[in-house]
Amino acid sequence: MTTRSMELADALTNAAPQVFGPAVISKAKLCLLDFLGCAFEASGLAPSRQAVAAVAAAPGGHMIAEAVTATPADAAFVNAVKGHGLVREDMHAASVCHHGVVIWPLLLALAEEETVSGIDLIQAAVVAYEVGGRLGRMLIDPAMSALFRPTGLVAPIGSACGGARLLRLDRAQAMSAIAFAANGASGLNQWPLSGGSDMFFHPGFAARNAWMAVRLARAGAFGSPDVLEGKSGYFAALARRPMPGPVELFPNGEADILNVYHKAAPACNFAQTACQTALKMVEMMGADTAPVESIRISVPAAAASYPGCDLTGPFDQPLQAKMSIPFGVAAVFAHGRLSEENYGDLAHPETIRLIGASELVSSAEFTALFPGRQGAAIDVTLGDGRQLSTAMPDVVPATEAQVRERFRHAAGALLGGEAAEAIEEFVDRLESRKDAGRLLPLCAAKADQRLSRPRAERNGRNTHPSAGQVS
């Protein structure tokens, strides 16, 4: 009997060489650089410091911007948490997942234990994004994401498949790695409603679970061959429906990593376009316009219904504000900008006033185009009675130049400009490197660069400081 996991295991090593063309390789390297930039910038934030504090010092695994090491599995956990700390990690809209913050920590940890080439690391990452993206398209729907965190459900399997390819596991071992990763899928979506910090740790759990899945499989542990489609398996348990078919990788020779985009704003994926549209409206209105009396925000149904995206307060934690579309839009109008600083004052009077004057609605037009396009529209009524409208058909991603500049600023602030340049140069030439495991040590801090606790923690408050705040 051939199972879906067996088919997937076979496909991991059978990808046509042309799918790993120059555009795909360049995209993978940019995703890696974006992950590293986010991890550096978030290293001083409370979740990052808590993750570091939760693991024991040990040889073997380097943690980004840290002078101490941990086991490779624990290092993968910490690096994944750091990569997710800004809420600005790369995004695959069709699967509603942040794959990179799980894939890169796992593969880089494996590369520290095994001597693997840079091109093998890149191809393993492309496969991991592919499995995660295609599987997520099959599994995730609004009903699912109302309860479970898509990244926690899908990314462990995609990452484990990347790890299986990187370590050249045989068919039986790869199948078992998929099974154990499916068993390790987890993550609930209560956190946006309660303001909990659970979200930051979901990628950490996923990366560490994927690590164990790959290592167990390599050690000979036997996982359920029909874990994906079985009557008590992955789809039956999570989606409450049969698996619709095989996970088809690289259909028509197209790599799903090319559908990953880099966030421009440090907020929820579903808030991106609405906030960008609000900024477009602010620029159109000018400085001397009458006060805004009401705001109507139109988004796809997936955005309007995602947990926390319709939250109108109270906002006890910055993470709640970063998830809230009304907060994000109101803050753009209140501050006249779209930046991290918008989320620094949760009680800003004008932001709170505008949230109360806002209405979030689901647009049939934008829903029909999603996830291929992620549009938004803003309609405002001004104090002088004028009504203004503007829309954007899709999210505008951060450019390569912006990703690079963010990385240089964040890495340079912690390690120095010379070290940041060395990391960027290593990534740029990754496909020619004989030992990809040299990358993480480059990202580690020297003893005199050790980060201190974030300011909020020193003051005894359990809060999440503004991104970029390194104390």
Image (tube, grey):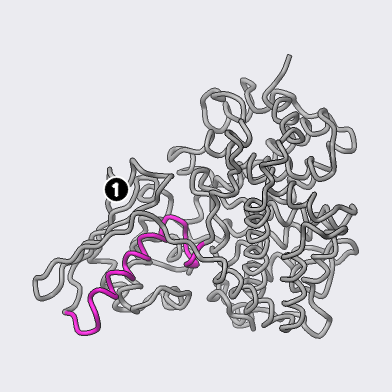
Magenta-colored segment: predominant secondary structure: helix
**121 versus 247 height, above or below:** below
Location of mark 1 (residue): 362
What's under tag 1, amino acid-wise? Answer: Ser
**Residue 273 magenta-highlighted:** yes
Q: Position of residue 382 (x, y in %)?
A: 15, 72
Category of crowding for the residue at label 1, using alpha-carbon neighbours closer than 10 angstroms: few (below 14), some (14–19), many (at least 20):
some
Q: Pick the quarter of the image with the C terminus.
A: bottom right
Q: Is residue 162 magenta?
A: no
Q: Quadrant of residue 455?
A: bottom right
Horizontal arrangement in the rendering, residue 380 relative to residue 47 (left or right): left
| Residue 425 in the image: above or below residue 414 | above
Number of marks drawn? 1
Label 1 residue SS? strand
Q: Magenta stretch: give its range.
A: 263-289
Locate residue 110, reporting x and y percent.
83, 52
| Depth check, front residue: 155 or 56 | 155
Q: Image quadrant of residue 325?
A: bottom left
Rendered location of residue 101, percent (x, y): 65, 56
Horizontal arrangement in the rendering, residue 355 relative to residue 372 (left or right): left
User: Outermost residue toward the left?
Assistant: 385
The residue at the point 28 percent across, 54 percent down is 298
Task: Indicate left or right for 338 with 210 as reference.
Answer: left
Q: Which residue appears at 19% of the width and 78% of the height?
A: 291
Quick one: which residue is furthest to the top in this view?
Answer: 1
Please report the residue visible at 83 percent of the width from the left and 59 percent of the height from the top. 436
Front-most of residues 44 and 270: 270
Q: Give coordinates of residue 299: x percent, y percent.
A: 32, 52
Which of the image's four quarters has the N terminus? top right
Residue at screen point 65% across, 77% down: 408
Q: Is residue 294 left or right of residue 72?
A: left
